[in-house]
Image (spheres, rainbow, N blue to C red):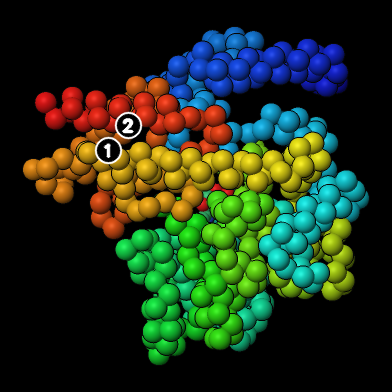
Amino acid sequence: MDLSLLRSVYAPKDFKAKGRETIDLISAHLYNNLSEISKTVIPWKNPEEAHTFWEEFLKNGDINTFQKLVLEQSTSIHHPKYIGHQVAPTAPITIVSGMLSAFLNNGMAIYEMGMVANPIERIITDLLCAKIGYDTAASGFLTSGGTLANLTALLAARAAKAPTDIWNNGNTIQLGVMVSEEAHYCIERAVKIMGLGEKGIIKIPSTSTFQLDTSLLQEYYDNALADGIIPFAIVGSAPCTATGMFDDLEVIGSFAKKNDIWFHADGAHGGAAIFSPTYVHTLKGIEKADTVIIDGHKMMMMPGITTAILFKNNNNSYSTFSQKADYLLDQSNDQDWYNSGKRTFECTKNMMCLHWFTLLKTYGEQVFDDFVTCLYNKGKEFAQMILDEDHFELAVQPMSNIVCFRYIEKGLSPQQLDELNQAIRQQILEDGNFYIVQTKLKGTHYLRVTIMNPFTTKEHLKELVALVKQKAGLLNN
Ligand SMILES: *Cc1c(COP(=O)(O)O)cnc(C)c1O
């Protein structure tokens, strides 16, 4: 058989040339975005138009222009006017760790296939545990995203707290998970994946500041029991995704302890504040949680996806998936931390720990403090700016870098205001010079920003306010 095609696939020289060219392109793109030489944050195209473009490219496009086109036609998260979803502008050094992981493909499930990554992962997760305030019984691992980490935590919770062995015998009783109505949708999804159905998600109403109303906890717990549902876990959001508001982890922790249920803290966004002396207070009580998750790709400058799941008692991390896989995993109950597949949902997994380790070793813990503290400060600044404006209103005084606000005008009905704010956001999206998002809170439409770039200044934010006003004026006439 002719191997010439495959030889060209693996030719080191071609890789070197392509690799260098790509790094040059990325560096130029980074520069153009940070310096705002590039004015476009999102080159909006409707989905059908984009589909046609790439279909045509596959037929007739020049592969040598592909990387440039991908850069040009994607949303530029490194642009200071990207103030939308809570994804980090990646620290460029982590692009390099991503390359190492992609090349090595050391899947980590067993030690031999992760002789670097497994020990590094332990070092990283032990550090995070210490920062949370856990003692030495704690440890954890990294997994592919907050959604999967929350599911894994709830599976561990069920293994620890359910009265029967559901993992082996199936759902023979109705279990339930208590969570704020404002929690990320992936909690409900996890509960349904676990086969607990609609009854399995016990939604606690939130207060006027969108935080879990802890005064209702005992009542909802008792009512669930009376309805034949056994609550085995409660989730606290740190913070909730839509509003960036933190649940009271201290009170939730006491409630969980009193009723002997699992306490899981979803710190996907805000868990990184364990590094910020200024904002660690937002996480008060987090050390009471049986499990905590923290996304590296949100407030820690890493590429997606990498999430730490941390166990107060590491023993619990070994009982989540007690399954036989003879060809791969030793069946013993040994706590062999270096065979990570025993504890993770994934079999093959990226060497995501390289991002954490590289940032830590290159810049020190300070860099995580600087990032979180700077961005949360900017959230406060922007909120003050909104308060100082006539035609604007905050949904709530923010506790993080997520701010929800809306344009208001006397004489317009609630429905007209919703429609106006929706139209403002659509125009800003299609113009593409700023990227902001939107959300519905207790039935009202809000514009939503997450300030993710340390180089987004007060001037940028003032410009955004002016743009919203201008769009509102045009739309109203
Ligand atoms: C983003 C987020 C998630 C989901 O995490 P992914 O890494 O996107 O899967 C879960 N919970 C909260 C609170 C979040 O902010």
Ligand 1 has an atom within 8 Å of the beta carbon of the residue at disc 2: no
| In the image: residue 210, left or right of residue 416 | right
The x and y percentages for residue 302 are: 66, 39
The circle on residue 21 is none
Quarter of the image holding residue 93? Answer: top right
User: Which residue is found at the position 18% from the left and 24% from the top?
Assistant: 474
**Mark 2 is on which residue type?**
Val
Q: Give the mark, 2 or 1, whose residue is nearer the N terminus.
A: 1
- For numbered disc 2, what is the local secondary structure? helix
The x and y percentages for residue 439 are: 34, 47
The circle on residue 465 is 2
Classed neighbour count for the residue bearing mark 2: other residues with Cα under 10 Å, few (<14), some (14–19), many (≥20)? some
| In the image: residue 358, left or right of residue 274 | right
Quarter of the image holding residue 163? Answer: bottom right
Q: Nearer the viewer, residue 232 or 56?
A: 232
- For numbered disc 1, what is the local secondary structure? loop
User: Which residue is found at the position 88% from the left and 46% from the top?
Assistant: 116
Quarter of the image holding residue 52? Answer: top left
The residue identified by callout 1 is 389
The reply to whether discs 2 and 1 touch (Cβ–Cβ < 8 Å) is yes
| In the image: residue 350, left or right of residue 456 | right
Position of the N terminus by quadrant: top right
Ligand 1 has an atom within 8 Å of the beta carbon of the residue at disc 1: no
**Mark 1 is on which residue type?**
Glu
Position of the C terminus by quadrant: top left
Q: Nearer the viewer, residue 135 or 228?
A: 135
Would you say residue 268 is visible in this rendering?
Answer: no
Would you say residue 287 is visible in this rendering?
Answer: yes
| Position of 44 relative to 227 (above/below) | above
What residue occupies the far bottom of the structure in this picture?
226
